[in-house]
Image (cartoon, grey):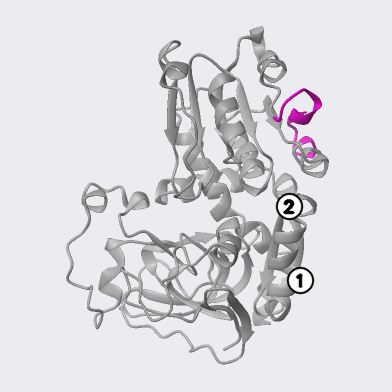
């Protein structure tokens, strides 16, 4: 089948020859992919990887699958085929995919040399989003959504109403990243909030906070076009470059009610300056959440007394769980997350044949001009509605 695939370090290209997915475990489904978004992780796999993908000649710890693999994990599709053990879906259902691959999924590959390995401690405790062997469908575990079809097990699929636009459905996965961050922060309605960075995850955090009943949000972002996106989604925006340094912390902190800092900060940029701002812009007993993905070999200066003196809290947020996917779907369907706002995240839709040159490279070289590019593996990028005419 047609796919945009990761072949080895530095080699991502379109192919017509990727192997068709097949149902192996009885609870698996095959989906026709309508839209699949490009994530910053996908870009890092090209510029810095392999990260989650196995190295050439090796296989993934969960699935024992090697390269090449179709990329893409922000998937919305339509059920094409179901296994005999599937109980919640029928052919023609519209679904989104929670793409984590963890110890819980080893049973899907009965011929794998890893199938009988014990679950890691995190999975044993139910924290599969921080599995010791965490990978993603479309990023190491198996082929993903930059392909015409994908096979996935039932517990990773969520049905959506056919009235929901499929391009918005493809945003549910990145919004779930932000929803998880807001949820584990123990956010309290009425609290003050600062978001550092208004790329896809920063904008997703605006939507997630809207879904939690928060509308008064300050966003700090140096790029004007991204500030405009955040402002268009209802946030109060701040240009951190207007002062003498890259964050202008005193002025930013003064924008909080009372002028003594925010109750919650969400670092969606992952730079030394935004880490510093996320802590220093907190009020007493405030909570800072790191949502950004940092390089594993990127040490920074950290001063514990910045946390201790005012009993602040600092934590990280990783991926999502089924609770977050279900909550985001419900929030979109009941209107707490507005479809019109969500659509503002979508910069363009590109066929997978041009996915590397016209989408991935554009995001790498012109990231300040784009937010979210969706690939259309079955060339239905013209569909603005629910996409049901694919079967008509």
Query: Which residue is the extreme one toward the bottom?
Result: 17
**Residue carrying label 2:** 343
Query: Which residue is the extreme one toward the top?
Result: 258
Badge 2 crowding class, 10 Å Cα cut-off, few under 14, some 14 to 19, many 20 or more, is some
Residue 335 pos. (x, y %): 64, 42
Q: Residue at x 41, y 86 (%)?
A: 22
Mark 1 against mark 2, which lies toward the viewer?
A: 1
**Residue carrying label 1:** 358
Report the number of discs: 2
Q: Which residues make up the magenta segment?
A: 231-246
**Quadrant location, the C terminus:** bottom right
Q: Residue at x 61, y 25 (%)?
A: 193
Q: Residue at x 60, y 48 (%)?
A: 333
Front position in the image: 256 or 273:
273
Residue 86 pos. (x, y %): 35, 73
Residue 190 pos. (x, y %): 58, 19
Q: Residue at x 51, y 47 (%)?
A: 294
Residue 312 pos. (x, y %): 44, 18
From where the camera sits, is residue 190 visible? no
Instruction: Name above or below for residue 116 compared with residue 241.
Output: below
Q: From mark 1 to mark 2, how far is it between C-alphas? A: 20 Å
Instruction: Name above or below for residue 364 compared with residue 292.
Output: below
**Quadrant location, the N terminus:** bottom right
Instruction: Name above or below for residue 109 compared with residue 18.
Output: above
First of labels 1, 2 by sequence position = 2
Q: Is residue 295 magenta?
A: no
Badge 1 crowding class, 10 Å Cα cut-off, few under 14, some 14 to 19, many 20 or more, is some
């Amino acid at each position: 089948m047609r796919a945009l695939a990761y072949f080895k370090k530095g080699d991502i290209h379109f192919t017509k020859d990727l192997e068709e997915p097949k149902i192996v475990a009885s609870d698996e489904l095959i989906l026709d992919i309508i839209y699949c978004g490009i994530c910053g992780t996908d870009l890092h796999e090209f510029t810095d990887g392999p990260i989650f993908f196995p190295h050439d000649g090796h296989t993934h710890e969960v699935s024992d699958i090697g390269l090449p693999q179709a990329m893409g994990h922000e998937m919305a599709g339509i059920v094409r085929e179901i296994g005999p053990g599937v109980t919640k879906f029928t052919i023609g259902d519209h679904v989104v995919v929670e793409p984590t691959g963890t110890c819980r999924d080893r049973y899907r590959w009965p011929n794998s040399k890893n199938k009988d390995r014990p679950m890691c401690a995190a999975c044993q405790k139910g924290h599969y989003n921080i599995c010791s062997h965490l990978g993603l469908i479309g990023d190491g575990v198996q082929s993903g959504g930059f392909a015409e079809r994908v096979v996935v097990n039932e517990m990773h699929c969520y049905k959506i109403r056919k009235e929901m636009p499929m391009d918005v459905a493809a945003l549910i996965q990145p919004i779930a990243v932000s929803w998880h961050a807001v949820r584990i922060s123990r956010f309290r309605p009425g609290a003050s909030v600062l978001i550092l960075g208004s790329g896809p995850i920063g904008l997703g955090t605006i939507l997630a906070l809207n879904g939690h009943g928060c509308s008064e949000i300050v966003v700090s972002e140096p790029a004007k076009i991204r500030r405009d996106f955040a402002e268009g989604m209802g946030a109060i925006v701040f240009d951190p470059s207007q002062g003498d340094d890259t964050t202008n912390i005193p002025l930013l902190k003064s924008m909080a009610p009372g002028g003594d800092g925010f109750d919650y900060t969400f670092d969606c940029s992952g730079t030394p300056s935004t880490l510093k701002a996320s802590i220093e812009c907190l009020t007493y007993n405030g909570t800072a959440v790191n949502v950004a993905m940092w390089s594993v070999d990127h040490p920074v200066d950290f001063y514990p007394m910045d946390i201790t003196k005012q009993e602040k809290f600092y934590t990280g947020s990783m991926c999502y769980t089924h609770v977050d996917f279900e909550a985001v779907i419900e929030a979109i369907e009941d209107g707490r997350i507005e479809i019109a706002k969500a659509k503002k995240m979508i910069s363009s839709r590109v066929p997978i044949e041009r996915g590397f040159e016209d989408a991935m490279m554009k995001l790498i070289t012109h990231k300040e001009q784009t937010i979210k590019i969706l690939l259309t593996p079955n060339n239905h990028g013209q569909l603005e509605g629910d996409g049901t005419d694919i079967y008509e």
